[in-house]
């Protein structure tokens, strides 16, 4: 890492702990955006735009009808009413997609469908509901102003307008804008390829029988799922044993297909089984730190391999790994896509029960947020190994560094989980 810890705001953290912000800042300065690439609309879905998308033509591109009805000259039907309908000759029909040179003349009309180009001379459309629906001749039962039921060229967007600024994530609505403005392709940041590797001698594949002393690996599935939820391509590597001779090759093998690596486990505060810390620590490009947070205190971040691929070594407890992902890895995935402000959305909410937090550390506690009520209910079972509570939470309640408890009725910032 290039930034010195000492340059950051020490006042929020006890000695030898790095603040959440300082750690995050050090991560972000070490991440370069991926090279943008031109992708077709479908492939670009879910990606972040690396260019502004502008309207190459006005939208809509031509004046057209907003309704099924009759294209008329408004002045011809100025006196029309239910009791005194105005009769117009119908000289034909113009449908959506027709390219012929249609026009109405005074005293005549054209049947028209929604989206059809407004014929020459016509300046309004009478909806079919306000007529008798006649074929050769039509009785118009309502007067219309010029422009009635007409969608004017440029009424949606003018030529040259920025429709989607660079940095926009392409969800279904943005994909519609891209397509509707005629862009078959767009310059986007590719989806980051994230490889997740779990470590630990105790880990067993879910679905297989447990032998005494073992647990099922959940982190690798969870972190891969979280990366996918964040718009990435995620690959999971099954558990690597706590053996330095196996760990380094396993991780190096993954560099080929990774824009970012995430490991879990093996980074605690000094056991001799902290194999990730021992093995990767020797490379000298990854820094292991204690961050002033709970859960998630032991954190490692750096770069690895020829391409200086960013690597996160997250703590092994599932809740610690999950919180670390949402607080740090998510921001890094944004940075890979040129976005430095990717964070989970947060809201203020009133806690419905008491909460405790250690002094000097920012706590992220699982809760159930009720947005309509503006309340958040803390869940019981806040231990960082307690996966059951993870399955019930939709939010993380934040308790600031020097606040040690909250009581029912206090307000807190709450991270909304995706
Ligand atoms: P470690 O960080 O390796 O010391 O692990 C801390 C705790 O997290 C231990 O109880 C581990 O068994 C547990 N743990 C580590 N990796 C995983 C994993 N992939 N899935 C579930 N639990 C894990
Ligand atoms: Mg371990």
Image (spheres, grey):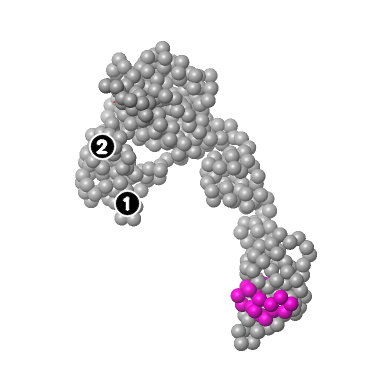
Q: How many residues crowd around disc 1 within 10 Å: few (fewer than 14), some, or many (20 or more)?
A: some
Q: Is residue 98 visible?
A: yes
Q: Is residue 140 above or below residue 120?
A: below
Q: Which residue is under mark 1?
A: 370
| Residue placed most toward the observer, 353 or 292 | 353
* Label ID, residue 382: 2
Residue, far top: 245
Q: How many residues crowd around disc 2 within 10 Å: few (fewer than 14), some, or many (20 or more)?
A: some
Q: Is residue 163 above or below residue 200?
A: below
Q: Is residue 125 magenta?
A: yes
Residue 138 percent location from the top left of the image: 69, 79
Q: Quadrant of the N terminus?
A: top left
- Ligand 1 under 8 Å from disc 1 Cβ: no
Q: Is residue 364 visible?
A: no
* Label ID, residue 297: none
Q: Residue at x 66, y 49 (%)?
A: 182
All told, the count of numbered labels is 2
């Amino acid at each position: 890492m290039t930034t010195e810890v000492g340059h950051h705001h020490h006042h929020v953290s006890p000695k030898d702990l790095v603040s959440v912000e300082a750690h995050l800042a050090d991560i972000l300065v070490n991440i370069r955006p991926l090279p943008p690439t031109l992708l077709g609309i479908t492939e670009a879905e879910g990606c972040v735009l690396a260019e502004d998308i502008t309207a190459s033509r006005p939208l809509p591109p031509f004046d057209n009808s907003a309704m099924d009805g009759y294209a008329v000259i408004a002045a011809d039907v100025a006196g029309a009413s239910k009791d005194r309908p105005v009769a117009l000759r119908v000289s034909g029909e113009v449908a959506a997609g027709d390219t012929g040179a249609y026009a109405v003349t005074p005293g005549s009309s054209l049947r028209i469908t929604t989206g059809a180009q407004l014929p020459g001379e016509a300046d309004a459309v009478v909806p079919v509901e306000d007529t008798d629906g006649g074929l050769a001749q039509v009785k118009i039962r309502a007067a219309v102003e010029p422009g009635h039921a007409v969608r004017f060229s440029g009424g949606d967007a003018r030529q040259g307008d920025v429709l989607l600024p660079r940095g926009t994530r392409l969800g279904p609505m943005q994909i519609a804008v891209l397509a509707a403005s005629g862009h078959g392709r767009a310059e986007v940041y590719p989806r980051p390829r994230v490889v997740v590797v779990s470590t630990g001698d105790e880990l067993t594949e879910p679905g297989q029988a447990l032998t005494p002393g073992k647990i099922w690996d959940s982190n690798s599935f969870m972190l891969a799922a979280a990366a996918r939820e964040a718009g990435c391509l995620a690959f999971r590597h099954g558990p690597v044993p706590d053996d330095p001779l196996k760990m380094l090759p396993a991780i190096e093998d993954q560099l080929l297909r990774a824009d970012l690596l995430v490991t879990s486990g093996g980074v605690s505060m000094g056991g001799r089984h902290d194999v990730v810390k021992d093995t990767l620590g020797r490379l000298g490009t990854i820094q292991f730190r204690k961050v002033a947070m709970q859960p998630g205190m032991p954190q490692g971040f750096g770069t690895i391999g020829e391409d200086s691929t960013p690597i996160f070594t997250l703590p092994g407890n599932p809740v610690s790994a999950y919180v670390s992902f949402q607080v740090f890895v998510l921001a890094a995935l944004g940075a890979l896509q040129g976005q430095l402000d990717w964070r989970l959305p947060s809201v203020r909410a009133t806690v419905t029960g008491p909460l405790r937090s250690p002094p000097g550390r920012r706590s992220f506690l699982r809760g159930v947020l009720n947005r309509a009520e503006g309340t958040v209910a803390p869940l019981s079972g806040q231990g960082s190994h307690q996966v059951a509570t993870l399955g019930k939470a939709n939010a993380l309640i934040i308790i600031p560094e020097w606040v040690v408890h909250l009581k029912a009725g206090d307000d807190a910032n709450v991270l909304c989980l995706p």
